[in-house]
Image (tube, grey):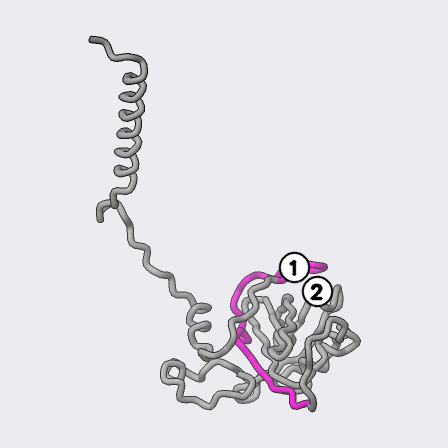
Amino acid sequence: MKLNANKQRLILFISIGLLIGLSFVACAAPASPTESATVAPTVTTTSVLSALVVLDTPVRPQSSPYPFTTPLPPSVETELDGVYGKVELREGTPVPCKRCPDYLPDGGVWRLWLERGVFRVHFLVTGWRSVGSFTLTDDRITFFNDPTCGSEVGIYEWERKERSLILKVIDDPCMFGLRAANFSNLPWDSCQPPNREAAVTDHWLRPKGC
Protein backbone atom coordinates (compact mmCIF):
# COMPACT_ATOMS: atom_id res chain seq x y z
CA MET A 1 0.00 0.00 0.00
CA LYS A 2 1.41 3.39 -0.99
CA LEU A 3 2.01 6.08 1.62
CA ASN A 4 0.02 9.23 1.17
CA ALA A 5 1.74 12.56 0.50
CA ASN A 6 1.59 13.74 4.14
CA LYS A 7 3.40 10.64 5.45
CA GLN A 8 6.07 10.96 2.75
CA ARG A 9 6.75 14.56 3.73
CA LEU A 10 6.95 13.57 7.43
CA ILE A 11 9.53 10.86 6.70
CA LEU A 12 11.54 13.32 4.60
CA PHE A 13 11.61 15.93 7.40
CA ILE A 14 12.68 13.34 9.97
CA SER A 15 15.52 12.16 7.71
CA ILE A 16 16.76 15.70 7.17
CA GLY A 17 16.65 16.36 10.93
CA LEU A 18 18.72 13.27 11.66
CA LEU A 19 21.34 14.28 9.09
CA ILE A 20 21.63 17.78 10.58
CA GLY A 21 21.97 16.36 14.09
CA LEU A 22 24.74 13.97 13.04
CA SER A 23 26.63 16.82 11.36
CA PHE A 24 26.57 18.88 14.60
CA VAL A 25 27.91 15.94 16.58
CA ALA A 26 30.75 15.45 14.11
CA CYS A 27 31.73 19.14 14.24
CA ALA A 28 31.70 19.21 18.04
CA ALA A 29 33.97 16.20 18.45
CA PRO A 30 37.28 17.22 20.14
CA ALA A 31 40.41 17.12 18.05
CA SER A 32 42.93 14.43 18.78
CA PRO A 33 46.13 15.42 20.60
CA THR A 34 48.11 15.00 17.41
CA GLU A 35 45.87 17.47 15.57
CA SER A 36 46.23 20.35 18.06
CA ALA A 37 49.48 22.24 18.43
CA THR A 38 50.58 23.89 21.67
CA VAL A 39 51.88 27.43 21.22
CA ALA A 40 54.46 28.46 23.81
CA PRO A 41 54.10 32.02 25.16
CA THR A 42 56.61 34.54 23.87
CA VAL A 43 58.57 36.39 26.55
CA THR A 44 59.83 39.81 25.51
CA THR A 45 61.75 42.51 27.29
CA THR A 46 58.61 44.65 27.26
CA SER A 47 56.57 41.95 28.98
CA VAL A 48 59.25 41.59 31.65
CA LEU A 49 59.27 45.36 32.11
CA SER A 50 55.50 45.37 32.57
CA ALA A 51 55.74 42.56 35.10
CA LEU A 52 58.25 44.49 37.18
CA VAL A 53 56.00 47.53 37.56
CA VAL A 54 54.49 47.76 41.02
CA LEU A 55 51.23 45.86 41.33
CA ASP A 56 49.04 48.79 42.30
CA THR A 57 50.19 50.99 39.42
CA PRO A 58 47.10 51.79 37.34
CA VAL A 59 47.08 50.26 33.88
CA ARG A 60 48.50 52.70 31.40
CA PRO A 61 46.10 54.46 29.04
CA GLN A 62 45.85 52.30 25.95
CA SER A 63 45.47 55.03 23.32
CA SER A 64 48.16 55.37 20.66
CA PRO A 65 49.64 58.53 19.12
CA TYR A 66 48.60 59.82 15.70
CA PRO A 67 51.17 61.28 13.27
CA PHE A 68 49.66 64.76 13.12
CA THR A 69 52.71 66.49 11.64
CA THR A 70 55.56 64.01 12.10
CA PRO A 71 55.74 60.28 11.24
CA LEU A 72 55.65 57.93 14.21
CA PRO A 73 59.13 56.87 15.36
CA PRO A 74 60.18 53.20 15.10
CA SER A 75 58.73 51.00 17.84
CA VAL A 76 62.03 50.10 19.49
CA GLU A 77 63.02 50.05 23.14
CA THR A 78 64.85 53.05 24.56
CA GLU A 79 66.99 53.42 27.65
CA LEU A 80 64.31 55.56 29.29
CA ASP A 81 61.43 53.12 28.80
CA GLY A 82 59.47 52.70 32.00
CA VAL A 83 56.85 54.18 34.28
CA TYR A 84 57.54 57.33 36.28
CA GLY A 85 55.53 59.22 38.87
CA LYS A 86 55.54 62.44 40.85
CA VAL A 87 53.35 64.11 43.45
CA GLU A 88 52.53 67.79 43.03
CA LEU A 89 52.08 69.33 46.47
CA ARG A 90 49.58 72.09 45.85
CA GLU A 91 46.78 73.32 48.06
CA GLY A 92 43.22 72.49 47.15
CA THR A 93 41.73 69.46 45.45
CA PRO A 94 41.35 69.81 41.67
CA VAL A 95 38.01 68.91 40.15
CA PRO A 96 37.15 67.76 36.60
CA CYS A 97 36.95 70.84 34.41
CA LYS A 98 36.20 70.97 30.67
CA ARG A 99 37.76 74.41 30.24
CA CYS A 100 40.77 74.12 32.53
CA PRO A 101 44.14 74.41 30.76
CA ASP A 102 45.77 71.08 30.00
CA TYR A 103 49.11 70.22 31.65
CA LEU A 104 48.41 72.62 34.51
CA PRO A 105 50.49 71.03 37.31
CA ASP A 106 47.69 70.76 39.87
CA GLY A 107 48.23 68.95 43.14
CA GLY A 108 48.11 65.17 43.11
CA VAL A 109 49.74 62.17 41.46
CA TRP A 110 51.00 62.44 37.89
CA ARG A 111 52.19 59.42 35.94
CA LEU A 112 54.45 59.35 32.86
CA TRP A 113 54.89 56.30 30.63
CA LEU A 114 57.75 56.08 28.14
CA GLU A 115 57.56 53.01 25.95
CA ARG A 116 59.04 52.35 22.49
CA GLY A 117 58.74 55.90 21.21
CA VAL A 118 55.32 56.51 22.79
CA PHE A 119 54.76 58.76 25.80
CA ARG A 120 51.59 58.85 27.87
CA VAL A 121 50.88 61.28 30.67
CA HIS A 122 48.05 60.83 33.16
CA PHE A 123 46.77 62.98 36.02
CA LEU A 124 45.23 60.46 38.39
CA VAL A 125 43.15 62.99 40.34
CA THR A 126 40.93 64.14 37.46
CA GLY A 127 41.61 61.36 34.95
CA TRP A 128 43.05 63.80 32.39
CA ARG A 129 45.55 62.22 30.00
CA SER A 130 47.39 62.74 26.76
CA VAL A 131 49.54 60.69 24.41
CA GLY A 132 52.24 61.42 21.86
CA SER A 133 55.58 60.38 20.41
CA PHE A 134 59.13 60.84 21.65
CA THR A 135 62.64 60.28 20.37
CA LEU A 136 66.02 60.19 22.10
CA THR A 137 69.23 61.66 20.73
CA ASP A 138 72.12 61.50 23.18
CA ASP A 139 70.95 63.54 26.20
CA ARG A 140 68.00 65.11 24.34
CA ILE A 141 64.40 63.89 24.42
CA THR A 142 61.90 65.35 21.96
CA PHE A 143 58.13 65.16 22.45
CA PHE A 144 55.76 65.56 19.49
CA ASN A 145 52.44 64.35 18.01
CA ASP A 146 50.71 65.45 21.21
CA PRO A 147 47.05 66.33 20.38
CA THR A 148 47.09 68.83 23.23
CA CYS A 149 49.92 70.76 21.60
CA GLY A 150 49.11 70.51 17.89
CA SER A 151 52.26 70.92 15.82
CA GLU A 152 54.35 72.25 18.72
CA VAL A 153 57.43 70.22 19.66
CA GLY A 154 59.04 70.01 23.08
CA ILE A 155 62.80 69.55 23.44
CA TYR A 156 64.35 68.69 26.80
CA GLU A 157 67.67 67.65 28.24
CA TRP A 158 67.28 64.50 30.29
CA GLU A 159 69.37 63.20 33.17
CA ARG A 160 69.15 60.23 35.51
CA LYS A 161 69.85 60.97 39.15
CA GLU A 162 69.78 57.85 41.29
CA ARG A 163 66.36 56.37 40.38
CA SER A 164 64.77 59.57 39.11
CA LEU A 165 64.41 61.09 35.65
CA ILE A 166 65.06 64.82 35.48
CA LEU A 167 63.84 66.82 32.46
CA LYS A 168 65.29 70.27 31.79
CA VAL A 169 63.46 72.47 29.29
CA ILE A 170 65.30 73.59 26.19
CA ASP A 171 62.26 74.67 24.19
CA ASP A 172 58.60 73.74 24.61
CA PRO A 173 55.86 76.28 23.78
CA CYS A 174 53.03 73.76 24.26
CA MET A 175 50.04 75.23 26.13
CA PHE A 176 51.92 78.50 26.64
CA GLY A 177 54.65 76.73 28.57
CA LEU A 178 52.41 74.63 30.83
CA ARG A 179 53.76 71.31 29.55
CA ALA A 180 57.30 72.55 30.14
CA ALA A 181 56.41 73.60 33.68
CA ASN A 182 54.74 70.26 34.34
CA PHE A 183 57.50 68.06 32.94
CA SER A 184 60.42 69.94 34.49
CA ASN A 185 59.35 71.29 37.87
CA LEU A 186 59.90 68.01 39.76
CA PRO A 187 61.96 64.84 39.23
CA TRP A 188 60.02 61.85 37.89
CA ASP A 189 60.63 58.89 40.21
CA SER A 190 60.97 55.46 38.63
CA CYS A 191 58.09 53.11 39.46
CA GLN A 192 60.07 50.00 38.53
CA PRO A 193 61.41 47.93 41.42
CA PRO A 194 65.22 47.98 41.47
CA ASN A 195 65.50 44.24 40.76
CA ARG A 196 63.46 41.09 40.23
CA GLU A 197 63.65 40.05 43.89
CA ALA A 198 62.19 43.39 44.97
CA ALA A 199 59.42 42.98 42.40
CA VAL A 200 58.49 39.53 43.70
CA THR A 201 58.72 40.29 47.43
CA ASP A 202 57.61 43.94 47.18
CA HIS A 203 60.37 44.78 49.68
CA TRP A 204 61.56 48.11 48.34
CA LEU A 205 61.04 51.79 49.05
CA ARG A 206 58.23 52.73 46.71
CA PRO A 207 58.08 56.41 45.67
CA LYS A 208 54.93 58.29 46.63
CA GLY A 209 54.04 58.92 42.99
CA CYS A 210 53.97 55.18 42.29
- Asked whether residue 10 is drawn in magenta, I would say no
At mark 2, the secondary structure is loop
Judging by the rendered image, the residue that carries numbered circle 1 is 66
The residue at the far left in this view is 1
Q: Quadrant of residue 112?
A: bottom right
Q: Position of residue 134 (x, y in %)?
A: 63, 69
- The residue nearer to you, when weighing 28 against 182, is 28
The foreground one among 97 and 154 is: 97
User: In percent of the image, x 77 and y 78: which residue is there?
Assistant: 177
Q: Which residue is mark 2?
A: 147
Please name whichever residue, 210 or 98, is drawn nearer the observer in this view of the structure. 98
Apparent side of residue 66 relative to residue 36 in the rendered image (left or right)? right
What's drawn in magenta, residue-wise?
A: 65-90
Q: Residue at x 27, y 48 (%)?
A: 36
The relative height of residue 42 versus residue 207 in the rendered view (above or below) is above
Residue 146 falls in image quadrant: bottom right
Please, what is the dominant secondary structure of the magenta stretch?
A: loop
Q: Amino acid at mark 1?
A: Tyr
What residue sits 70% from the left and 59% below the top? 68
| Image point (75%, 64%), residue name | 151
Residue type marked 2: Pro
Q: Residue 5: x and y, percent? A: 31, 13
